[in-house]
Amino acid sequence: MDVSHAIITRMNALCAAKGITINGLCNRAGVTQSTVHDIMASKTHSPGVATLKKLCDGLDVSIREFFNTELFDDLDQEIK
């Protein structure tokens, strides 16, 4: 799995666990729907740290909590 898909999977899991829709997350995080759509559709392969921080704030988790999952343990090599 690559970083982009791991981020998408993690965002979906956290939204589901907290009962938040993706659109609801946009509103809570103050991130435009187009930005989140691009992330979720893999159009943005590496969202910026500031954007991820806002999304984490909207999910009420720290960046450390966001990445503290096995999803990010064995990612594919990004340099090709």
Image (cartoon, helix red, strand yellow):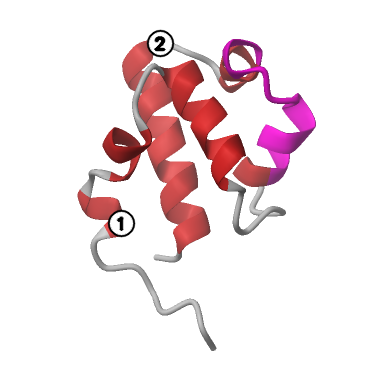
Q: Tag 1 or tag 2, which sits nearer the N-term?
A: 2
Q: Is residue 55 left or right of residue 23?
A: left
Which quarter of the picture shows residue 73? Answer: bottom left
Q: Which residue is most to the bottom? A: 80
Q: Which residue is mark 2?
A: 19
Q: Is residue 76 left or right of residue 44?
A: left
Q: Which mark is residue 72?
A: 1
Q: Residues within 10 Å of mark 2 (few under 14, many from 20)?
A: few
Instruction: Say which amino acid is labelled 1.
Output: Phe
Q: Secondary structure at mark 1?
A: helix
Q: Main secondary structure of the magenta part?
A: helix
Tell me which segment is drawn in magenta.
27-38
Q: Is residue 53 above or below residue 72?
A: above
Is residue 41 highlighted in magenta?
Answer: no
Instruction: Say which amino acid is labelled 2.
Output: Gly
| Disc 2 from disc 1: Cα separation | 23 Å
User: Which residue occupies 39% across, 40% down?
Assistant: 10
Q: Which mark is residue 49?
A: none
Q: Position of residue 52 (x, y in %)?
A: 53, 38
